[in-house]
Amino acid sequence: MYIEKKTIEQYRDKNRLTSPRHITPYMSQNEYFNTFCEEEAASVITIENQWTIEQHQSFIVTKPSQGEGSNAPQDVLSRCYTLQSHFHVNDYNRVNDYHLIINEIKLPTFIFIDEQMVTYIEPEDTYHRINVTPFVQEGHNHLKMICFPVAHWYKQAQIHDFYESMHIVARGYDRIEDFDIFCQFYPTLGVMQPTLHIKDIEGAPQITYQLLDQFGDILQKGDIDIDTPNCLDMNTISIEETHIHHLTLMLETQDEVIMHDIQLHFLQPLAHQAMTKVISC
């Protein structure tokens, strides 16, 4: 197996999306409250658990450095593993975008779909989100990865760790890509003030919000401005009531619903402080 070094540079992080927020959309509020985990959402396409793993000798072909007598390419002998599996897209929609999510990667890796090279990625301290929309088709899709073990990597069993949480997410075209939410608690009033800032979008989403308690009951709702920070009205909600354990912020666009949990952890203010922050998870 020959791999040219220029191919690595050509495909390094190609088709990778850089938004820091990992979003799993839902079809509705009802779907969110009736699924056990994100992987059960209709937008999530799972990779089959049956993988074939083969070990190969590979040669990474590099150009000789200046000053070397020969102009012939140099072959660097290496090991590599080829992992292959499949996934099925049963309700393909050409309007959707399809993103491959890899939560943890420990090895430098080439990724192919139906023998078309998608990208080359290397280990980082964050997840990888890769746009595979041009490569995905209705029905059966073949996924192949070529992984290059590093010096301290020696157990083939470790290769299972890095694809356990791999999956594909279907996203609507008009969507939220990233947002921030900051909360302040006013102890004298017993109310909390969340501020939502939409940081990045795709297309032209029309966004509304609802604040729900842990039972899914609506406490507040309204429209979201994508251009300015939005102070969500909670003046009528007393979060000191014992039955409210946490809140869920529901952001709805034309195509999908995003749910964000707000955990109520209070920091005890000092005597001279008028407010304290609430940690938003």
Image: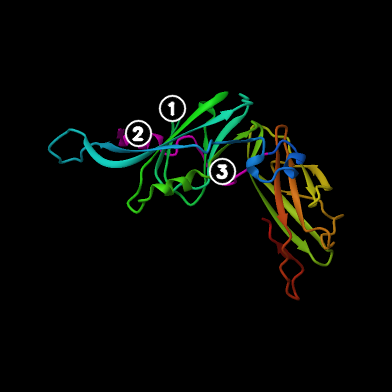
Question: Residues in magenta?
Answer: 1-25
Regarding mark 2 in the picture, which secondary structure is present there? helix
Regarding mark 1 in the picture, which secondary structure is present there? strand
Question: As shown in the figure, which amino acid type bears the numbered disc 1?
Answer: Gln
- Label 3 belongs to which residue? 19
Res 64 quadrant in image:
top left
Q: Is residue 36 visible?
A: yes
Question: As shown in the figure, which amino acid type bears the numbered disc 2?
Answer: Thr
Residue 7's disc is 2
Question: As shown in the figure, which amino acid type bears the numbered disc 3?
Answer: Ser
Q: Is residue 161 left or right of residue 93?
A: left
Q: What is the CA distance from the residue labelled 3 to the residue labelled 1?
A: 24 Å
Horizontal and vertical percent for residue 86? 51, 31
Horizontal and vertical percent for residue 228? 70, 45
Residue nearest the viewer, comparing 240 with 174: 240
Q: Is residue 208 visible?
A: no
Q: Is residue 211 left or right of residue 255?
A: right
